[in-house]
Image (cartoon, helix red, strand yellow):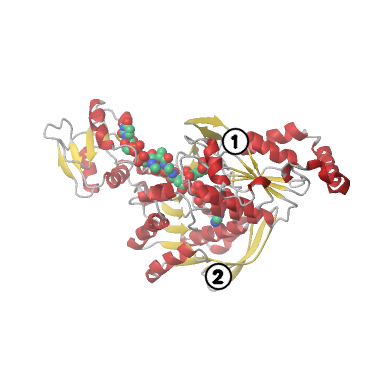
Amino acid sequence: MILRDLIPHLDNPVVSGSLDTPITGLTYDSRKAGPGIAFVALRGRTADGHEYIPTAIQAGAAAIISEQAPPDDAKVPWVHVKFTRIALAQAAAALYGFPAEKLSIGAVTGTNGKTTSAFLLHHLLNQGQKRCGLLSTVVYDLGGQQVPSTHTTPESLEIQHLLSQMVDNGCRAVSMEASSHALDQERMHGLPIAAGIFTNLTQDHLDYHGTMEAYYAAKVRLFETIAHQSKGSMIINADDAWGRKLITRYESTGRVVRYGYGVGYDFRAVNVRFDLTGTTFELEAIGRTFLVRTPLIGDFNVYNSLGALAAAHAMGLNLRETVSHLKNAPQVPGRLERVTEATSKFQVFVDYAHTPDAIENALKTVRALRPRRIIIVFGCGGGRDRTKRPLMAAAAEAGSDICVLTSDNPRQDDPQVIIADAVKGFARPKNHVTIVDRREAIKIALENARAGDIILVAGKGHEDYQEIQGKKYPFDDRRVVRQLMTQIHGARDAERAEREREREAERDQDPRNRDAGRGRPPFYR
Ligand SMILES: CC(=O)N[C@H]1[C@@H](OP(=O)(O)OP(=O)(O)OC[C@H]2O[C@@H](n3ccc(=O)[nH]c3=O)[C@H](O)[C@@H]2O)O[C@H](CO)[C@@H](O)[C@@H]1O[C@H](C)C(=O)N[C@@H](C)C(=O)N[C@H](CCC(=O)O)C(=O)O
Ligand SMILES: Nc1ncnc2c1ncn2[C@@H]1O[C@H](COP(=O)(O)OP(=O)(O)OP(=O)(O)O)[C@@H](O)[C@H]1O
Ligand SMILES: N[C@H](CCC[C@H](N)C(=O)O)C(=O)O
Ligand SMILES: [Mg+2]
């Protein structure tokens, strides 16, 4: 491709230099600039790409796309535009041959449930004979070929490249998460959206957006895109207060599909029942009732299922068949993933809850399984929204019997400071255990679990690392739980250990032993 081929796709470009310059690629990182590559200068939070233009030129960049006019002595072709993030998306689409035009796109936004809903939609579309790609926090699926995920929603340049690989692999659809960061940074600019799902909005990412209103405004952009298209459905959780606001804003388009539990919604769940093995409910939609069965458990997964079903229907699939495909839905890695056997004396779940609302919901779900006690192991991320920390602790305390507060990804923050922030949210801090080392925290929970208990290890879900001071150490909650279970109980001795704990519990009930545990947190008794 030559520069001339890119120009018509950009908004009001002012070009200087030769239009016949060959362009083989694009980059927004000067460190990746080189011959044939056009460097796009982005204004970031910590740096301004414009300051790296000289470095890019020195590295041999073929052209510059910038929000600044070229200097008089510019040595390379220069494209001056108003917004380089939009120009990057437009140029990348052109470079990769407009792959989005060959795909039907389902996009999920909201604070919680994006990954789960996107996985479900991906599964339903694949089963419904539309080979489907997936862009998610957990993995990118290019149509059978899986690659590691770098972002929930990558930069536009990467999106367009990934979509083009999906097209090459025969995909006709894609299910993707739309993070608020991505929407705010125009990473999805120009993508035609067949169905947009809004799951919910609760506190997160205030470090980035500042206020809930600004956070909401970022989410709205997905639906504004759909409103400006000639078609496309807006699948909105009508039980969520922010969702209702969104519905009011767009109901005049006639393209809103409301989902949830409320009477009269377009996709409504009734008679919900679930146990350790899955959930059953009746779906009322398109004037009919369908019996839905899914291996996913919990109220919030009913919402995720409703959103995915409504989107799949909006994207042209037969609803009856689609409903039947939900019963083979995959386990979403690290989302209420049961690590223990169904027959185990106590259950351990690993979950990605890392917001106050997600913790509350995950705990409600496991509470409904009627455990004897719930022990939650959780921490709060460093370098992110600090105000959510005490709220996470409050939600953990309210929904569990014992909290083991530990580290999540401390990143650059001091783990003790993170824990101190969180502890402020506990009403009864003395009832809980705080321990910086996450492995030790999980160990304490496992050592103290008794028959009938549920342990919820929250926050890191599918993550296979722990980030401390800029370094990622291997750490996978699911592996750690399995290793420790074997270590503590021994695979075959697990049963005997259980019985011993039972006897201990009985001994503790004995009034003669009442004082034995005095002065220690109730957890250790
Ligand atoms: C907060 C945020 O979203 N940051 C994103 C943003 O970075 P930034 O604005 O800080 O960029 P910067 O470091 O200031 O640099 C500005 C520009 O200068 C360039 N540069 C910089 C240095 C240099 O030597 N040469 C050079 O050219 C950079 O490549 C960049 O283009 O723009 C970058 C380029 O597009 C992104 O990679 C980066 O994502 C960072 C890695 C990140 O961690 N983002 C997270 C918070 C994120 O996006 N998360 C959401 C999920 C959230 C959720 O819903 O849970 C996601 O979609 O993954
Ligand atoms: N619909 C929902 N409503 C509320 N909580 C949910 C919902 N779905 C999942 N959760 C909870 O939130 C956690 C994260 O779920 P999921 O990964 O699907 O969300 P996400 O929006 O993709 O999160 P992230 O933005 O961090 O990638 C789950 O582990 C679960 O505890
Ligand atoms: N996408 C989320 C992931 C958080 C996961 C949690 N384990 C943490 O590190 O806080 C974020 O960037 O806020
Ligand atoms: Mg996600």
- Residue 104 percent across, percent down from the top left: 42, 54
Neighbourhood count class around disc 2 (C-alpha, 10 Å): few under 14, some 14–19, many 20 upward: some
Is residue 405 left or right of 177 when viewed as pictured? Answer: right
Q: CA distance from mark 2 to mark 1?
A: 43 Å
Residue at 38% of width from left, 71% of height from top? 252
Q: Secondary structure at mark 2?
A: loop
Quadrant placement of the N terminus: top left
Q: Is residue 52 above or below residue 14?
A: above
Q: Quadrant of residue 165?
A: top left
Name the spot of residue 281 as percent of width and height, x first: 64, 64
- Asked if the residue under mark 1 is in contact with the one under mark 2, i.e. CB atoms within 8 Å, the reply is no
User: Compared to 319, does 348 lie above or below?
Assistant: above
Q: Residues within 10 Å of mark 1 (few under 14, many from 20)?
A: some
Q: Is 232 situated left or right of 421 in this image?
A: left
Foreground residue among 89 and 359: 359
Q: Amino acid at mark 1?
A: Val
Q: In the picture shown, does residue 129 fall above or below 442?
A: below
Q: Position of residue 372 (x, y in %)?
A: 75, 52
Residue lying furthest left = 72
**Nearer to us in this view, 131 or 110:** 110
Which residue is more in the foreground, 383 or 183?
Answer: 383
Reading the image, the residue beneath label 2 is 262
Which three-letter amino acid code belongs to the residue tagged 2? Gly
One can see residue 244 in this view: yes
Mark 1 — residue?
436
Identify the mark at residue 237; answer none if there is no mark: none
Question: What's the residue at 22%, 36% (across, down)?
Answer: 64
| Mark found first going from the N terminus, 2 or 1 | 2
**Label 1's element?**
loop
Q: Is residue 123 visible?
A: no
Left or right of residue 59, residue 415 in this image: right
Q: In the picture, which quadrant includes the C terminus?
A: top right
